Amino acid sequence: MTAAIAVIDGKWKTALLWLLESGPQRPGELRRRLPGLSEKVLTQALREMEADGLVHREVHDVLPLKTVYSLTPFGRELSEALGPVSDWGHRRLEKLAEARSAS
């Protein structure tokens, strides 16, 4: 469990996994879909995810350079494993909000 959490640690990594499930995307597309995510933090998260083998970075040799990120098989496997956790969260969202406001 600790190893899995270490790979997805951080505010944005699970959201990035979820967005990349729909297919390869450029960094600008990812930023537009995640308001509040700075370019610096996006770059750092994608580099960490690439180093962990979750995403593949492809640079197309065109001007201007076009960088595209996609999930690796390992990243897709992790994203699928997180699906039930996401489903649980959605089912419990109201109860979680109530519990947080009560504390």
Image (spheres, rainbow, N blue to C red):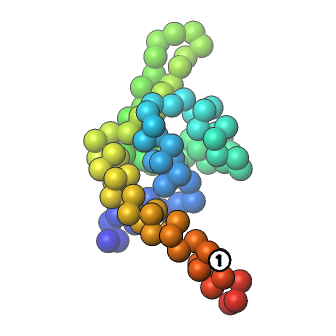
In the picture, measured across the screen, residue 3 lies left or right of residue 31, that is left
21 vs 73, nearest the viewer: 21
The number of numbered badges drawn on the structure is 1
Q: Is residue 103 visible?
A: yes
In the picture, measured across the screen, residue 3 lies left or right of residue 23, that is left
Q: Can residue 7 be seen in this view?
A: no
97 vs 63, nearest the viewer: 97
Residue 49 position within the rendered picture, expressed as x and y whole percent measured from the top left: 43, 47
Considering every residue shown, the one lying at the far bottom of the view is: 103
Residue at the spot 71% in from the left edge and 83% down from the top edge: 101
Residue at the spot 71% in from the left edge and 50% down from the top edge: 36
Q: Mark 1 points at which residue?
A: 97
Q: For the residue marked with disc 1, what is the amino acid?
A: Ala
- Quarter where residue 21 is shown: top left
The quarter of the rendered structure image containing the C terminus is bottom right
Residue at the spot 56% in from the left edge and 41% down from the top edge: 43
Residue 12 position within the rendered picture, expressed as x and y whole percent measured from the top left: 56, 54
Residue 30 position within the rendered picture, expressed as x and y whole percent measured from the top left: 59, 38
